[in-house]
Amino acid sequence: MTGTTRRSLLQIAGLSVIATAAGCSEKPTSSGNAQNLGALGDVLPTQRDRTGTIKPDITGTRPVPDGYLRYPNPLTDAITTKPGTSGRAISAMTPVWGPAPPGTAQSAYLRAVNAELGTPVDFTVQDGGTYADKLNAVFGARDVPDLLCVPGWEIDKIPRFAEAAKVLFTDLTDHLHGDLVQPYRMIGSFPAAAWRNAVWNERLLAIPNPTDSPFPYALFTRKDLLDQRGIAVPGSLEQLLAAAKEVTDPARKVWAFSEIFPMVQMYHRVPGAKGGWRVRADGTPEFKYETAEYRQALEVMAKIYADGLVHPDLVASKGADQDQLFARDGAIVFAQAGMGFWQAAQAENPKSNLQPVPVFAADSGAPLVWGAGEPISYTFVKAGLPKDRVEELLRVVDWCSAPLGTQEAQLRDFGVAGKHHTAGPDGPVKTDLAFKEIANQYFFISGRNPAIGPFPNTPNYVRDVLTYSNETVKHLEKDPWEGLKLEMPARFAANRVPAEEKFTDVLRGRRPLSDVDGLVKEWRDNGGEEARALMARSL
Amino acid sequence: MRLRDRLRRDWQLLVMLVPGVVLLLVFSYVPILGNVIAFQDYNPYAGTNPLTAFLSSDWIGFGQFQLLFEDPAFWDALRNTLTITVFQLVFFFPLPIALAVMLHHLLSRRLRGFIQTVVYLPHFFSWVLVITFFVQMLGGAGLFAQTLRDAGLEPWNIMTNPDTFLILVTAEAVWKDVGWGTIVFLAALAAVDPHLYEAAAVDGAGRWRRLWHITLPGLRPVIVLLLILRLGDALSVGFEQFILQRDAVGRQAAEVLDTYVYYFSIATGNFGFGAAAGLFKAAIGLVLILAANRMAHALGERGIYSKS
Amino acid sequence: MRPVWEEPPTVPGRALKAVILTLLVASVLFPLWTVLVTSLSPPSAIASAGGFVVIPRGFDLSAYRTIFAGGAVTRALWISTLVTVIGTAVALTVTVLSAYGLSRPGSTGHRWLLAYFLIPFLIYPPLVPKYLVVTGLGLKDSIWALILPSAVSVFNLVVVRGFFQGIPPELLDSARIDGAGDFRILARIVLPLSSAVVAVIGLFYAVAYWNVWFDALLFIDRNDMYPIQRVLQSYLLAGQAPHTSGAAASLPPTEAIKMAVVVLTVAPIVAVYPFIQRHFIKGVLIGAVKG
């Protein structure tokens, strides 16, 4: 390291405690800070292409990953030496959504993979829905396992994450930066953008698990239901709203939409970067609430609610099951969902035809699509371990990160041949035992150089998703704060939900649209201006 | 009496309290000390271990409380919470008593057992399920709305009307817990000596007089006790029920103290704030318990603690 | 049978009572019926009903098969039975002893001890210190982590104490004059007179232990030690992974599985309740005990 000149932490305003006029009483406040990731070139590993990679069937336009239609054959042996050398069990904690898979003693799958690793990984699988509660407890008690998975969306729920990371986890910079990553060939192939996200306090603290979709949501439709009614997939906002009116039929228990406000905002080119910021022509930052585009989107969505086009179960309770209503019952025709929903839903209901509605702009201009490039999860290594143990853990993580087309990946994803899968013409077919024992355990302590497919049970999916993604990626919003990690001022953060909920009142018709000016002013006074100042300084 | 004599008299009572005292000490009092973070800008990662973190965090006096009291949203949430508590004390609290009396006087023991077993089951349904039932019956796609539509009428919105939300949440709570609430009262009724009824009837007391002079006095100590305990918990009216229906009726109607603390604490990552709100709730609960107990004494009831 | 001294009920009174009770019972039985039928319905019937099935069409046990496959539920049932039986026994013992110990105003230290027991009703411990205490005592992954922290419910304690204080003091005084100590009085006089409230509080504790879930999230890491609600809830959470990636995504459980979870949550309680109920239907004849 070259010393202080590399001190690139852009400490715009540190966490500070500001005394109030009351005197001895102080209120805990933070005016926020930002860490500049762009200038962190030399804490990051040198990215190198993995040699001997299998050729993709459809190339994605980056950041869209490549698509694979067929399961590769023959497989390569990517890692020839056993990564585990000590034989001392590695404790790990990962999330699971659904029934917990059996522990090592009862799981042929875990035993088989652990035997390949040479050192067993002893998993504690925690309920994904309450993972943040568990994390807050083990963080506060400083009781973390050797390898800890933290999903990206949980990080915001953990107060003072950067400070926690400094105390609890091993700094991986000196193990992985630059060419030091070379022995770890699998993780060394991860996209640089994913690594950039794994930096806290200007140090590399985790191994990212890169995402395979750059978009937060898409608007999906049940094309089979549209076909039945002789309606074409809409290509404009007018067509969408017309189709919505046509399909909505309360007597038959069918409604057009789920909650689709984020999509409606994209159609109106409302900014989405860092939660909704963009830069005005004069160079000052502007938040979405302040834009004319947001107001138009609000008006359109309020009209959708007023016209009764959203399924009333979803309007009445957060506990309603959108996926059930849309994918299984067909009681919703257009639903907003994450990209990962598509394949799972299509596979479960082969009679349906799920298709994304191609993005369009409300006017005749070019559409805008928000980005969501953050990694799915991060793997942290516990602090205070000896150097050779850390290296062993990194080798294990590297082994678990082997990509499609390797024997390692097949064992990790499909278990043991004859036990967990049988060889089919389209690749391995999972047995019942596999569904019981394999639950993404090793996926959540590693990463994948992203790829899409193959999915033999949904034969059109890979082609469809790449067609949609390669088209949509052209309209991906440019983030003016790309590479920056921002900690927003406390007042702004505290007011985020209340402000959002006041606009929800407008959407749902509990407040008139004419209130919007007042709400924007309120937002500016309640931390909005402070946040703007931070955004301006970070440009 | 000298302490020695008193101890000789009471030692068995004191021995009986030992297990309770120890359990509360270990599992309540020691962790309760963690509430010191209400007076701190608590940083779990200060100091060398989790315990010293409590000592090395910055002390900020009553800053968290000031933050709480200066926030108009806090007062809104407090007002909503108290409105719901009072409304439910009037329209919910008496219902299990009435139902218990009704069940107690059913002649057929089998019918009574059956009804009791049925009505207390909704207690075991999650809030998600309870609200789903209400949506299925009263929501825009529910049975009621469909019936109206079939009859050519315009369905009106019951599940999404902020003005009637108070009634809706109370109806949901009544359906879920009215049967469960009867259990303690049934136990109290079981302790009433049946001979009293017979004697009163022989003296010519009618149905209502017997209810007034035997049944209710038999229940009164329990009613008073539960009322006092409920008041001690007056600032808790539920959490999940309100989170689930928050978007449906808006924050204005559905924000209660617990949801407020949840959102505020999470959004700012400020654990101390949650602790401060918890201490505030405890203080109000304490005041209400003391006041209710004093009132009970004025009415000649024993309450939780006696004057002596 | 109506006792001879009781007058026959009036017609409107009877009608009103019948209407109220019928409506109440129907309002529970109807949803319960749809839950049961839905849990046993094939997916096609659920899709065509748009959620809850009212009129059975087809019979499909696959939801229950899914849940019971693999033995996790069976094992969890054992763990929960253990937690409930031991937990209720411990909690009842401690609660009854404490309630009696606090039932005599004017006894040594009474006011201070009462305050000591009441304060935890008002103030709750934060998450992290609670976790530190339980793990610090080495209780992680043991059933005691689920039992001990909730073995004293102040609410239950106050209710039992209220019932104890309602026992006519003459009964206790006469025993005391006969030379009986407090342990003896509690066992011989107070408890036999209080079977109703002890049954009720026992039920409260048993239900709380049977439903233990959040403490299991915090303190139980080994999945062969999970209690039943922890396992059943996990079926409801299937598919709630944020849809960020094809690799992590799955759909939520079918409506049939969700409803089967409800049935399995309620069923044991339906089975056990009548046995407990006896204690507070019967009524205790004070005179009979006295004699």
Image (cartoon, rainbow, N blue to C red):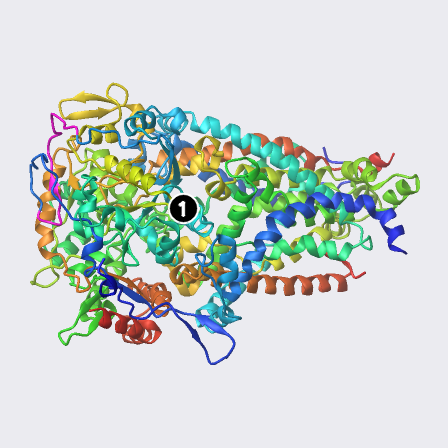
Which residue is at 21% across, 71% downward? A286
On the image, the x and y values in percent for residue B25 come to 64, 50
From what the image shows, is residue A281 above or below residue B262? below
- Residue bearing the label numbered 1: A130
Quadrant for residue A265, please give it: bottom left
Instruction: Provide the residue span drawn in magenta.
Output: A61-77
The quarter in which the N terminus of chain C is drawn is: top right
Q: Position of residue B32 (x, y in %)?
A: 58, 55
The front one of C142 and C18 is: C142
Q: Position of residue A494 (x, y in %)?
A: 38, 66
Query: Quadrant of the rendered structure where residue A80 is?
Result: top left
- Would residue B156 be found to the left or right of residue A411 on screen? right
Name the image quarter holding the C terminus of chain C.
top right
Taking B91 as reference, is B259 left or right? left
Q: What's the residue at 19%, 54% (across, down)?
A: A245
Camera-side residue: A316 or B22? Answer: B22
Left or right: residue A475 versus residue C20 is: left
Reply yes or no: does residue A138 show up in magenta: no
